[in-house]
Amino acid sequence: MERRVGTSTKDNPPVSSNANRQWGGRFAEGPSAIMEAINASIGFDRKMWRQDIRGSLAHAAMLKHVGIISADDEAAIRDGLDRIAGRIEGGDFPFDEALEDIHMNIEARLSAMIGDAGKRLHTGRSRNDQVALDVRLWVRDAIDGLSGQVQDVMRALVARAEEHAGTVMPGFTHLQPAQPVTLGHHFLAYVEMLSRDLSRLGDCRARLNECPLGAAALAGTGFPIDRHMTAKALGFDGPTRNSLDSVASRDFAAEFLFCCSMTATHLSRLAEEIVIWTNPYFGFVKLSDAFTTGSSIMPQKRNPDAAELVRGKTGRVVGALVGLLTVMKGLAMTYFKDMQEDKEGVFDAAETLTLSLAATAGMVRDLKPDVGRLAAAAGAGFSTATDLADWLVRELKMPFRDAHHVTGALVAKAEGMGVDLSGLTIEEMREAEPRIHEGVYDVLSVAASVRSRTSYGGTAPANVAAMAAEWKAKLA
Ligand code: ARG
């Protein structure tokens, strides 16, 4: 029998009022409780208290400078905000959900403490430019912190690259053995990726570094404020040029989330490689107990959880980017409350990436390559076949296509005999191409193969050592 939704049966009891209380009990109090809960952002935007106070201090100093408030009022505001900062820092500030957000919580407390002077602080500004300012300041601080961490991961990779400039390993395409490379070269590939991430964060910072404070609600203000002064005091290059844009735009936050997403994606690829490399079938590297966990039931297991989580958390970061773009895409000018949804994703992405960068730096410093296994794997799978084809072109002046064909025949022969290319005798090779001579064996070893890759950006150990030294100097 078809069971209709909403029909209660023995297997499908009605939702009890108990369950209802657990999930939404306080909403029984009525519309005002529901409104407060959906409206308030204090639960998460309290993270911006430092930025909010910094902005208010700059605003008050400017109001005094242009004569909108008295010197006494400004001094009282400064003192009051300092005391509030101390209380928040000490965990002794009564955040009130009824006061909606961090801006109103601080302002209400200030007015309660110092009276009329506190109530004058909001002259010539609105919460719309205030929140735009606070988020910019928060993102700017986050960029500075993350940039330092990206450089730390780069430093860790460069150190390992220096150490393993000559350590051979298989290079892959399609996760199939392709040509031998060096482990140092592999690490430096990530250094290049992260260096672009770092420069993207810098670009994002430069573009967001304009001050929206003073755009007021949306149209600017009739008070004789000095927006250049507040912009300068807060470390911006200058004020934003259009008041509507100032309160309506969050592209700086979306750009930041893209920067975080791209960085997280790079970390995720490295994490994926660590997962593969630590698998015993590969056995390329070992991670210590510091970055692995055991299984509660299988005593032999050593799981690369930190790498898996760096990979997994990337989903959250990318989700925050998609979330914000989706929030913004339908908004007419200018501010809508929808935009309050910008913050949790931005905070979470930045904090998640902070953790992922720390874990990656830790794993890179921790991992122990198994040089022997890497070398054995580097030689497997006929990985020097391209070197053989190149030799036929160079030594016998064969067109590359023909050399490719001859090499293919030799690989098939070796595979059939269960040996690698250097295991074929010269007679066996000559069955495929009679002009082949003993010199061919010089290019069939893995060491010779990587040594020969001296083109700029190639994997030759000498190249890798030089590039690692260059990066080391740049990052010092
Ligand atoms: N909590 C709000 C936000 O995060 C602050 C701005 C409120 N402005 C307004 N007009 N309601 O966006």
Image (cartoon, rainbow, N blue to C red):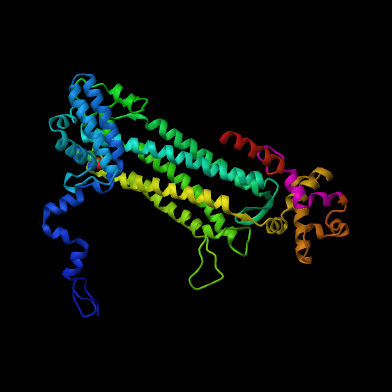
Of 337 and 69, nearer the camera is 69
Of 326 and 152, nearer the camera is 152
Of 213 and 175, nearer the camera is 213
Q: Which residues are magenta?
A: 439-458
Q: Tell me the residue at 62%/55% (across/down).
A: 368
Q: Tell me the residue at 21%/26% (across/down).
A: 74
Is residue 332 visible in the rendered image? The answer is no
What is the chief secondary structure element of the magenta stretch?
helix
Q: Is residue 121 above or below residue 162?
A: above
Q: Tell me the residue at 20%/68% (across/down).
A: 19
Q: Is residue 8 above or below residue 60?
A: below
Q: Tell me the residue at 27%/43% (across/down).
A: 88
Q: Quadrant of ligand 1?
A: top left
Left or right of 267 in this view: 88: left
- Within the image, what quadrant is residue 394 found in? top right
Question: x and y percent of residue 351 in the render?
Answer: 39, 47
Q: Is residue 446 magenta?
A: yes
Of 382 and 378, nearer the camera is 378
> Which image quarter holds the N terminus?
bottom left
Q: Is residue 449 magenta?
A: yes
Q: Is residue 454 above or below residue 233?
A: below
Question: x and y percent of residue 166 in the render?
Answer: 70, 47
Question: x and y percent of residue 15 in the render?
Answer: 19, 70
> Which image quarter holds the C terminus?
top right
Question: x and y percent of residue 455 in the render?
Answer: 70, 38
